[in-house]
Amino acid sequence: MTTPLSMYTKEEQRAVFRFLRKMGVRSTVQDTAIRTKRGTLLLKKLLLLHDDAHPHTAAHTVETINQLGLEVLEHPAYSPDLVPSDYHISGSLKDGLRGIRQFKHIFIKFG
């Protein structure tokens, strides 16, 4: 019994085809269909963008990245569109509202 490829995501399908190619299995019909549908997507170079999280700085991970020949993109520690003020907006406003709950547009003051 076979399983239709449409059940799998595009990335899963690509992984299967890459594996089969590495194992020496080639299908000109599949190759032609993939190239027609995906264009040069399979030929693009893979770039890896990650932060300095511990798994990404582990010696084994860094070694594997280097062995695979992946290009690691550097980026700033903080995203320019997320500034600390985004997390602390209206601190004094929150202090004034402490203990007040809104329930069906009726404000109730506790304690």
Image (cartoon, rainbow, N blue to C red):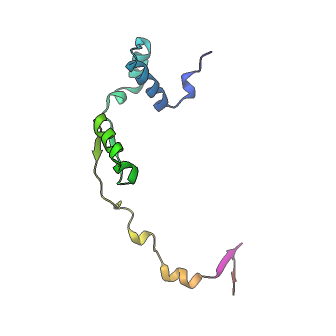
Direction from residue 66 to residue 53 in the image, left or right = right
Question: Which residue appears at 40% of the width and 49% of the height?
Answer: 55
Q: Please determine whether, in this image, residue 73 is positioned above or below residue 18.
A: below
Question: Which residue appears at 36% of the width and 53% of the height?
Answer: 51
Q: Magenta stretch mostly in which secondary structure?
A: strand
Direction from residue 26 to residue 92 in the image, left or right = right
Residue 60 x %, y %: 35, 43
Q: Please determine whether, in this image, residue 83 is positioned above or below residue 10.
A: below
Front residue of 17 and 92: 17
Q: Quadrant of the N terminus?
A: top right
Q: Give the total number of marks visible in the rendering.
A: 0
Direction from residue 33 to residue 95 in the image, left or right = right
Please report the bounds of the magenta region as a residue range: 99-106
Q: Which residue is the extreme one toward the front?
A: 59
Q: Please determine whether, in this image, residue 63 is positioned above or below residue 11.
A: below
Residue 92 x %, y %: 49, 83
Residue 49 x %, y %: 34, 47
Q: Quadrant of the C terminus?
A: bottom right
- Examine the structure image and report whether residue 104 is included in the region drawn in magenta: yes
- Examine the structure image and report whether residue 65 is included in the region drawn in magenta: no
Q: Which residue is the extreme one toward the bottom?
A: 111
Residue 46 x %, y %: 33, 36
Question: Which residue appears at 32% of the width and 32% of the height?
Answer: 44
Question: Which residue appears at 31% of the width and 34% of the height?
Answer: 68
Q: Please determine whether, in this image, residue 105 is positioned above or below residue 76.
A: below
